[in-house]
Image (spheres, rainbow, N blue to C red):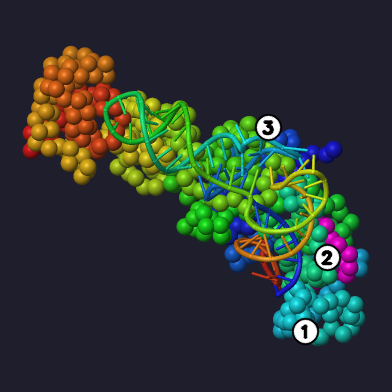
Amino acid sequence: MSQVVTRFAPSPTGYLHIGGARTALFSWAYARKMGGKMLLRIEDTDRERSTEAAVEAIKDGLSWLGLHWDGDAISQFGRASRHAEIAHELIARGHAYKCYCSPAELDQMREEARAAGKPPRYNGYWRDRDQSEAPAGVAPVIRIKSPLSGDIVVHDHVQGEVVFKAENLDDFIILRSDGTPTYMHAVVVDDHDMGVTHIIRGDDHLTNAARQIVVYNAMGWDIPEMAHIPLIHGPDGAKLSKRHGALGVEAYRQMGYLPEALRNYLARLGWSHDDDEIFSSDQMIEWFSLDGLNKGAARFDFVKLESINGHYIREAKPDYLYGVMIALAEEVGRLADLEGLTANKATVLAALPELQPRAKTILELIDLAQFIYASRPLPIDSAASALLTPDARSVLGDVRDLLIGLNDWSVEAIDAAMRTLAEAKGLKLGKLAQPLRAALTGRTVSPGIFEVMVLIGRDESLARLGDQIDTK
RNA sequence: GCGCCCAUCGUCUAUCGGUUAGGACGGCACCCUUUCACGGUGCAGAGCGGGGUUCGAUUCCCCGUGGGCGUACCA
């Protein structure tokens, strides 16, 4: 059997949205699994809506997710002459013809069909009409002769055998009056010329598959294997709106998601391998098969994405995370954080193992690191200031006295000293630790407060403590 | 309107005729604990409705219902 060739064929009218990313992921995984190739074709025949910026956004998105395509991206628009050539060949073979109908006539046909309870379609007016009847000055379109009877069946790896009655398909346009190809025609010619063996795409194309088969048959070309995967829906079951996640993958990066987490989450939306939830790209490639694809649409769930993201943050190496934090702070314009993170690299790196289990996104990770480079006197949030009562401040005075006399500035030594002090004063450790946390971080939530003290150092710790004791 | 697709806990899913219907996220409770997380333990939670087929249906078939997609000289 020949080598497997899949393709991802987005139209560059915007960013790489989440549904497209998943389609690409499956095409990529299948190609890798089979030792084949995944090609990238930019469907830019709609000159009005296609932009170069979108092409770049799509490529960036794929690269960020680690979905590398083979060879150069192919521009569909650049192949227009080939599409026209095939359209004319189809006429020569008697499988297509020129149609001179006006838009008004077409509208009327659709109205009549609808009124008769039939699918709105072209009635084949010029199918067998002699070209000599052509009206003068009208540039014709080229339509393909769709079979008049019988069934067209799509053999789909996900949906099974899907049967369409020929009478429900009309003679659709393959070449516009301006000589440019329609999508339906260009896709077939390109997939054939590119040697695509497996088409994996959204099931919004399932009906199109039947029409495309008409073109394959007319040309006598082999029909590729097909797998129409269900679409991703929003939390409400309806189409995915922007508010519900229909964003470009770069938006996910900016929200602080790791590419490996997004990739893992997307993989589990519509595909599964037993009960496995967390897996690497390599494992996915090893396990992937078209049989594992689901038929029903899945709903996008940010909460689960966050959970998976949290997992990958916990597992990650600090230096990798540090790099992501820096890049993200820069990308989203958090300059103060970028500066603090950069100036305190060693401390941030040392703190990361404490921070990681507490963050679900990289943005949260940055927030958690702020205590390291916050400048004095620290801003104290409302919950923290509520802890700094007069009583608490006086306890902090005792804490400071104790700490000043401490020779060994380690977590163990501070811990032991604090416990002794708490016991001596008949207080629970929390009564000392919470006000201390408020004073040292300005918040009520942080890593272990003794770890914090070691991280920021003795001088800074005592200074921040002093700010709260002396200010009152 | 017409055509096509889909349907298991709130969500993502396992099951490929016989299971106490399993896992994950989320929820709740408890444990751990200087806060918050992390981690651990436990609990609640599902086969859309109705007909068949079968000794036996979540699983196969039909109807209904509910979603989705398509129906362009867009892709």
**Label 1 near label 3: C-beta < 8 Å?**
no
Corner quadrant of residue A366? top left
**Which quadrant holds the N terminus of chain A?**
top right
**Residue shown at 44% from the left, 31% from the top:** A314
Amino acid type, residue under disc 2 in the picture = Lys
Q: Secondary structure at mark 3?
A: helix
Kind of residue at disc 1: Gly
Which residue in the protein does label 2 denote?
Answer: A165
Name the kind of residue labelled 3 in the image.
Glu
Circle 2: is it few (<14), some (14-19), or many (20+) Cα within 10 Å? some
Tell me if mark 1 has few (under 14), some (14-19) or many (20+) residues whose alpha carbon lies within 10 angstroms of its own: few
Marks 3 and 1 belong to one chain: yes
The numbered dot on residue A137 is 1
- CA separation, marks 1 and 2? 36 Å
**Does residue A337 lie above or below A410 as drawn?**
below
**Dividing the picture into quarters, in which one does residue B21 lie?**
top right
| Position of residue A54 measured from the top left corner of the image (x, y, whole percent) | 56, 55
- Label 3 packing within 10 angstroms: few (<14), some (14-19), many (20+): some
Subunit bearing disc 1: A
Q: Which residues are magenta?
A: A142-154
Is residue A334 left or right of A407 when viewed as pictured?
Answer: right
Q: Residue at x 17, y 41 (%)?
A: A386
Q: Nearer the viewer, mark 2 or mark 3?
A: 2
List the residue tagged with mark 3: A286
Looking at the image, which residue is at 56% across and 57% down?
A237
The reply to whether callout 2 and callout 3 are in contact (CB within 8 Å) is: no
